[in-house]
Amino acid sequence: MPRPTGAPARPALPRPTWATCPRGAVRTRPAETASTCRGRPSPRQEACPGCLFGATDPARTRARSDRGSVVNPSHSPRGRRRPLRAAAVAALGALALLAACTPRPHVSTASAVGSADPATLVFHHPGVVVGRSQLDTVRARVRAGQEPWSSAYEQMRTSRYGSLRYTPHPAEVVPCPPNAGPPACLAEREDAIAAYTQALLWTVNGNEAHARKAVEIMDGWARVVKRHTEGNADLQTAWAGSSWARAADIVHAGYPQWQAPAVQRFKWMLRKAYLPAVTAKVPDYNGNWELAMTDAAIGIAVFVEDRQVFKDALDRYRARVPAYFYLASDGRLPKAPPGGSMNTPDQLATYWFGQRTYADGLGQETCRNFLHIGYSLAASGHIAETAWQQGVDLYGPTAGRLAAALEFHARYQLGARVPPWLCGGKVDRTLGPDVEVLLNHLENRLHKALPQTRRLAEQQRPAGTDDLFVAWETLTHAQNPGAAV
């Protein structure tokens, strides 16, 4: 595979510093500050240009109206009482204002070796599935012609998603019935992957035309789309939403030419046309749905900096992954889906596609096909990796379970004989490009040996895209643990 040529030298992605704002204000990113500051600009705003005064602190409250707007606690009548006391507090607060608003390095208050309190979490950007140090590593490896990253980059660059002539096809309504693919469904998924592809190309080759193309695609949809309909609406929203969040977080973190009104329009789109669907309750659906939906939800939460949605996604992962991938320590039966109605042995056997013998690593959809197992492995990796990039270790309690699931399915995907007790002695070996993110963490951070999964990954490399929500993960995650958060 030829090395990419004509790539101009480009420094590492800019690492913005964030202002620590006083009570009653929230920080914005640099690209938003000039045009979105509200409330009381004056001396306070001048002293802390990265702060929004009079805005809701999401760490303290997230009361929302039916339209999703944030209710400001300062509007409470209680906040207008005792003016003399309030004045004294304000005077004391003014003395500490400069210290409180001094720019601080972009660091998290949480460690990836523990858990974070969402009320105090500081979000990292870019940090949806792939982090800043990983992107810097990708850029260096590709420019040095190292494999498999150079071939993976070329595969991405020459795909239809990487063309600067790519034309998006936004739609106001995206109808997606089961077992059918209307044009709007396909267009939305492909446009979201194209936006992510263009964002990755820009980070590697430095050509701002790719950043502009990503913005063009995202803004096209943000101006048009209103809702998703039909039976597969939630799943469609999850697939597209996960790619949108990755693309947006990369571009917004380092491309200030994405203007604040367009950024806010895109955030509004994600909140109104995506979040309600991907946070819906689907306990009795096949587990790949809820995992894909949580993948989108946590990515959107990071991009829009919504702590409550982020926390809910963590909780959902912690409940669903143990109910999807079995370990003998669960007992004789798999864990029931959280909040669902599948509780008896017969109900669980039906839910697990007729399987009544359970072994370490078996998945709820193993006897359906490995295609859907792959979706669930990929989504689980995306969720846990996004949390990791924000300083939260979701992997830890599920690492053994995920390792068992990877090895179990990789073994049979590679051709091992299927025993009679497993799916009647026959499995559908259709696992896609779904193992790189989990393999990277388990092998390169935890130093676990996963020989079957490594062999499968090496056969699949360079892993491309499934044209749904998995894309270019050999490029971004193969042997790429990144810097500690």
Image: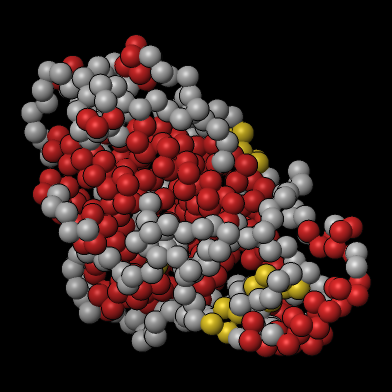
- Count of picture labels: 0
Query: Front-most of 363 and 111?
Result: 111
- Left or right placement of residue 475 versus residue 17 in this view: left
**Figure check: 459 above or below 344:** below
**Figure check: 90 above or below 184:** below
**Figure check: 417 above or below 473:** above
Q: Where is residue 162 in the image (x, y as percent from the top left)?
A: 41, 63
Residue 464 quadrant: bottom left
Residue visible at 90% across and 64% down? 80
Q: Where is residue 339 in the image (x, y as percent from the top left)?
A: 50, 27
Q: Position of residue 114 (x, y in %)?
A: 38, 59
Which quadrant would the C terminus be assigned to in this image?
A: bottom left
Residue visible at 16% across and 54% down? 448
Which quadrant would the N terminus be assigned to in this image?
A: bottom left
* One can see residue 211 in this view: no
Query: In the orientation shown, which residue stands out farthest toward the left?
Result: 417
Q: Position of residue 150 (x, y in %)?
A: 24, 69
Residue visible at 52% across and 72% down? 253
Query: Front-most of 225 and 247?
Result: 247
Query: In the orientation shown, which residue stands out farthest toward the top?
Result: 346
What's the colour scheme? secondary structure
Residue 366 quadrant: top left
- Left or right placement of residue 140 versus residue 65 in this view: left
* One can see residue 322 in this view: yes
Residue 409 quadrant: top left
Residue visible at 35% across and 18% down? 348
- Left or right placement of residue 39 versus residue 318 in this view: right
- Left or right placement of residue 84 versus residue 31 in this view: right
